[in-house]
Amino acid sequence: MNGYAINVQGLSKSFHGKPAVREFSLRVPTGRIFGFLGPNGSGKTTTIRMLCGLLTPDSGSGTTLGYDIRTEAHAIKREVGYMTQKFSLYEDLTIRENLEFIGRMYALKNLKQRVSEALEELGLQDHSAQLVGTLSGGWKQRLALATCLLHSPKLLLLDEPTAGVDPAARRDFWDHIHALAAQGITVLVSTHYMDEAERCHALGYIARGKLLVEGSVDQVIKQYGLTTFVIGGAEPTALARELRGKPGVEMAVPFGATLHVSGTDSRLLEQSLAPYAAQRISPGLEDVFIQVINRAEKD
């Protein structure tokens, strides 16, 4: 694999003449967690499906786990765990029955033992006889991850796995993901949560089918050269309307009871904000990605 679990260049895919992914290139080293961000309809799911062999790209090439994504899709599927965006297990079966069914699909040896191990690893053993349709979102998430891990994959592709899950369950989930990465398993996870993105070793942002930015959290923030100020003590929505269009103000976004004001020309921005009680802060990922979205829409 030359040290890369994912190594693809120039992937493109269209549906009915409409581009879904355009010239997508990415390298993810083995044992790393890569965060995949972007708005709905940006091409994240299509990209994930090409990486795991479920879709063949119209153009481009590359490998997943050392296997050619065009000619060795079957081999990729055997060594990848794919957690879909929508929960897709059988709700009229128990937790154990779902795991045994998936295990038979992979023709696992020692099926009973492997299912018992998966139940224990995800803390599901005390609920193994419970019908899946009665589970909460957090427990369904645990079960979905358990099915992904049942066949001991080398790569996990997780498509918005924590959507609709409470913060405590999300934290437990991410603790488990980091434990898996420490064992050498590579993880690509799509998410809309900035706190989750910050827990990744590296991340990328895709919009309209194109990968716009990639790197570690610090690299991504530095790449856009944003200067950000926070202003409190005023109604943020009205203040945002007042500030937008002033020299140096590229973004004015309410954050609760405060307003984040950002721009790439720090001198002009400071001059425009001089009359206000503005405090300079380090820009966060959310500030950067709002900037990315704004630039993408203009382009």
Image (cartoon, rainbow, N blue to C red):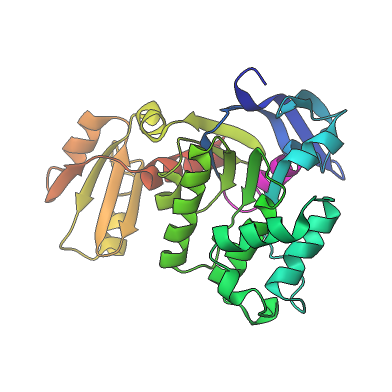
**Does residue 106 show up?**
yes
* Rendering coords of residue 113 (x, y %): 70, 58
Residue furthest top as drawn: 2
Residue at screen point 24% across, 66% down:
235
**Does residue 193 show up?**
no
* Quadrant of the snapshot with the N terminus: top right
* Rendering coords of residue 103 (x, y %): 78, 56
Residue at screen point 77% across, 23% down:
61
Segment colored magenta: 39-49
* Quadrant of the snapshot with the C terminus: top right
Horizontal relation, residue 19 to residue 16: left or right = left
Instruction: Using the image as rendered, state which of residue 43 and residue 56 is in the foreground.
Output: 56
Q: Is residue 81 above or below residue 70?
A: below
Q: Quadrant of residue 13?
A: top right
Task: Tally the marks.
Answer: 0
* Rendering coords of residue 123 (x, y %): 53, 65
* Rendering coords of residue 30 (x, y %): 57, 29
Q: Is residue 245 above or below residue 102?
A: above
Instruction: Using the image as rendered, state which of residue 97 and residue 60 is in the foreground.
Output: 97
Horizontal relation, residue 236 to residue 108: left or right = left
Q: Is residue 77 above or below residue 142?
A: above
Residue at screen point 18% across, 58% down:
232
Horizontal relation, residue 136 to residue 197: left or right = right
Q: Is residue 107 above or below residue 2?
A: below
Residue at screen point 15% across, 46% down:
279
Horizontal relation, residue 52 to residue 280: left or right = right
User: Is residue 5 located in the magenta-colored stretch of the structure?
Assistant: no
